[in-house]
Amino acid sequence: MTGQIPALEIENILAATRDLWEQMRGGRIFISGGTGFFGCWLLESFTSINRRLDLNATAVVLTRNPAAFHRKAPHLATQSSVELIAGDIRSFEFPAGDFPFLIHAATDADALAAIKAPLQTLDTIVEGTRRVLEFASRCGAKKLLFTSSGAVYGKQPSDLTHIPETYSGAPDPVVTGSAYGEGKRIAEMLCCHYGEKYRFESKIARCFAFAGPRLPLDGHFAIGNFVRDAMAGGPVRIEGDGTPYRSYLYAGDLAIWLWTILFRGKARQPYNVGSESEVTIAELAAAVVEVIDPRVRIEMAGVAVPGKPPLRYVPSTKLARTELGLKENIDLKEAILRMARWRRNEKGRE
């Protein structure tokens, strides 16, 4: 994927965050995970806003493979305000100089990887976070944003439609697939400990599910797979019974929320990041088909069991809305449309 995010997207991000950027003038930010879905949106908005506001700021981005990122997003990799450094999140060499701002977004959100290699998943999250925090303790950090996950809550009760930050549930430690959520819980604790000890502000964003350009269409994300299948003429296949509830925040809104939490969020106060507009997986598939091609057939692998409580993964974002004034600007169908448009444009460049 080599195309730039449309200029209108950047304008919307800038309009929502303009008054926040002055504190970064002339400064440097360190970003781990800067070449993934989250990272590309953050870098895209950073580089554009940096130019627009003449901030003279620099982003140093940790990546395992700089050459691959050059191929994926050359317009970002070659920016004069972006420096790529190669390294493993668990052992990277600390770049020299002061970094008042850090974003730790390096993680593998692959649920299958967490099941197949739980110890590796746990180690990467925990030791990677510790390494970033050790760097933060030595580089003059003022504010650090950690992208955590709604997985820290464990299984959402079926009668709790929107899960708040105050919910005290947790992943089941005897379930192998809990490694991802458990790792994020430990990482949050480490962030708070290091921030308090070394006197920098640790910000925590508990991220749920998202949609938009650059979301992989060949991974484990249901919405990405549905868009891929619909654009290929179908069928759109639902692997389960279609009853679980999910919600999807648009990627442009995600960037606004993450920048706002970094700059204005309270230290050691987790904020849920996601949409409150819940849909079942079956309703999601129907929305994708309606937007992309109503002729496409939907296949359901499972059969719903009458009376069975539905699974949920939907946040309450009241805290982000009331404390930080954040909101959802793009609805689900528009997000699907923009995903499809992006993919068509990318295929046109191939």
Image (spheres, rainbow, N blue to C red):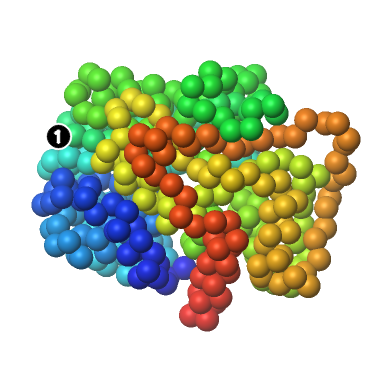
Side (left or right) of 257 relative to 80 = right
Q: What kind of residue is marked 1?
A: Gly
Above or below residue 48? Residue 114 is above
**Residue at x 34%, y 57% (from the top left corner):** 13
**Residue at x 16%, y 45% (from the top left corner):** 23
Residue 63 appears anywhere in the view: no
- Residue 15, percent across and down? 30, 58
Q: Secondary structure at mark 1?
A: loop
Q: Which residue is mark 1?
A: 140
Instruction: Mark 1: give few (<14), some (14-19) or many (20+) Cα within 10 Å.
Output: some
- Residue 259, percent across and down? 32, 46
Where residue 162 sits, quadrant-wise, is top right
- Residue 298, percent across and down? 80, 61
**Residue at x 84%, y 50% (from the top left corner):** 301
Return the residue found at the far bottom.
348
Where residue 233 sits, quadrant-wise, is bottom right
Side (left or right) of 234 relative to 14 = right
Side (left or right) of 4 relative to 331 = left
- Residue 7, percent across and down? 35, 70
35 or 150, which is in the foreground?
Answer: 150
Residue 172 appears anywhere in the view: yes
250 or 317, which is in the foreground?
Answer: 317
Where residue 265 sits, quadrant-wise, is top left
**Residue at x 54%, y 36% (from the top left corner):** 315
Above or below residue 124? Residue 220 is below
